[in-house]
Each structure stands twice: as C-alpha cells, then as structure tokens.
Image: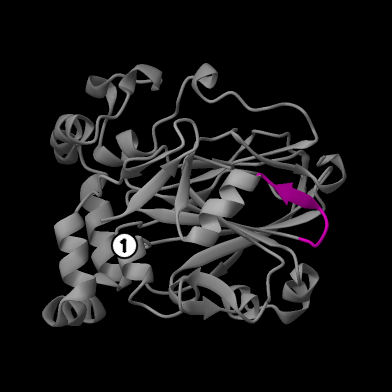
Amino acid sequence: MIKIYDRKTKTYEEENIAGKKFIEWTYESPLGKGVTELIAKRKIFSKLYGVFCDTKLSTKKIPEFVENFDIDMAIAQKKISDFTSFNDFFIRTLIPSSRPIVSDENILVSPGDGRITIYDDINLNNIIQIKGLTYSLSELIKDDKIAKNYENGVCVILRLCPTDYHRFHFIDSGIPSETFKINGHYYSVNPIALNSIPKLFCENKREWSILKSDNFGDILTIEVGATCVGSIIQTYSPDKKVNKGDEKGYFKFGGSTTILFFQKNKIKIDDDILAQSKKGYECKVLLGEKIGTKAHERK
C-alpha cells in the first residue's frame, strides 16, 4: 500500500495504482523479476505497447480507465468520444482555468501534476532515491561539470502516475538550453519498483536540459521515462525565451518522473512538503501549485 499526503486535507490517502498487481508481481516475486529483466525493462516492450496505444482500437480502453480512476473529464479540452487513440487521451490538454499558475515571480510552483518529494542540502554522491537507496547526480546526467553546480542544493522529484495529466511545464520565465538525451531501460517508477531497483533513475531512459531562469538560478530539469513510456516529447524551442507556465513537453502512456535540481540558496521549500519528504511520504500536487519561494522571500 502506498500512502500519499494530501496538503489540503492534511490527511493520508491510499494511492489507486494502475496495474498494481502486475507491478507487485514484476518487482517483488522471483519469477516476475525475471520477466522484468528479460522483457518489461526493454525498449521493445514499451515501444510495441506504445504503438498499440496510438491506434484507433485502443480508444476502447478510455471509458473504463476514466471510470476506474475517477478522472475529471470536465476539465479536459476534448470529450471522451473525440480522442483518436488512448495516447491522444493520455496526453490530453486541460482548460487553462483548471490549472492556474501562481504568477508572483517569487513563488515556486510545481511543473506538473503528480506526487512530489523534495530533499534539501543534497550530497551529490548520495541523492536519495528511496530509503536505503541512493544515486549520484553525475551518474544521472553523465556530466561531472554541470553536476558540481548543484552541491548542497535542492532536489525536487515529481512522480507522475498513469492517471495524471502528463504534460510538464516551465516553472519560471527564462532561456532553456537544448535537450541532452541518455538511452536506458524502461523500469517502472512506482515506489514498489524504486524500492527494488538500485539507482533506477540512472538506469532508465532520460533527457535533461537547463533553464536559465529569471528568478531561481540555473534549474537542471530531467525527464525520466518508464515502463510503457514509448516517448518523451519536448515541445519547447531551445535558446528562446519562455514564460512561467509555458508547456515544456509531455510523456506518452505510462508512469514517469520529472526531477528538478536547484543551486544552493536559490529557493526555500514549503515546510509541509519537506516534513512529509523526511517521513518518507510523497505529497499530492497539481501543475502551478505553490511548493516554495525564492530563498530571500522566506520569512
């Protein structure tokens, strides 16, 4: 059972996991682990499933998925009958009023919907993946020079479930760099898998870039693929000015993760998120929701 902290109600709730029994089998049973290593973690498995999710036939999955996970379609820009495939539904856009972006330049917001964990004063060689398992930033991005800029900074991990809005956005205005791509496997990013696969984020396919932001320094942004995520699609233009809240890209079907690294003394994270992260709980957040402030604005 995975418990998530609801910031609004200040209570914990159990996460309704898509494919829970399959994930538990593949990452916790001896036979399932074997299948994962032989098949599920490999590109061909996710690619083939991604091809199916791009077909008209896959639209039959949409109504049941919406019902099982109580997805609010009133905030989507398309009706269920208008989607041309399951992936078309999965990367659905929302009406702007459903995800208001806090415009105050001193406010740090979430880059998307998901479950957030944050660590401050990080050790670059021992960044926490989950209790007992760590990784290094150099391993994650394969660039020692860039990694050194984030010593004792802040790491923000936003885990997206298959049920979430799957587009990710810029959290501040600024100039984004080109995207650097690193090939890898396609392990699930669910906590069940994170607890089983050492350095999972460093094993999976991932892409990274730097946003030279106007208010929070140079933000290292990493998108991590996962099982059935056939593609990470970047929709922004490198080296061109972006505004806070602009779309950066999206993930096709599957759970996935966005990781942000901030330099030392650039931001202050909200106390409730830090407290829950230290207890080992993720906090549920939405795109544009306040998660912190500029360091000098904190009182």
Residue 186 visible here? no
The percent position of residue 164, horizontal first and vertical second, equals 38, 40
Looking at the rendered image, the quarter that the C terminus falls into is: top right
**Quadrant holding the N terminus:** bottom left
Q: Which residue is under mark 1?
A: 227
Q: Is residue 136 above or below residue 8?
A: below
Rendered residue at 50%/75% (across/down)? 202
Which quarter of the picture shows residue 288?
Answer: top right
As for residue 269 lying within the magenta part, the answer is yes
Q: Is residue 147 above or below residue 94?
A: below
Q: Residue at x 40, y 20 (%)?
A: 75
Q: Position of residue 270 (x, y in %)?
A: 66, 44
The residue under the point 42% across, 37% down is 165
Q: Is residue 48 left or right of residue 103?
A: left
Figure coloring = one colour
Instruction: Residue 166: say if magenta.
Output: no
Identified by mark 1, the residue type is Thr
Q: Position of residue 63 (x, y in %)?
A: 17, 29
Query: What is the magenta segment's predominant secondary structure?
Result: loop
164 in relation to 3, above or below: above
User: Residue drawn at (57%, 53%), measured in percent from left and top?
Assistant: 275
**Res. 81 image quadrant:** top left
Q: Position of residue 73 (x, y in %)?
A: 32, 22
Span colored in magenta: 263-270
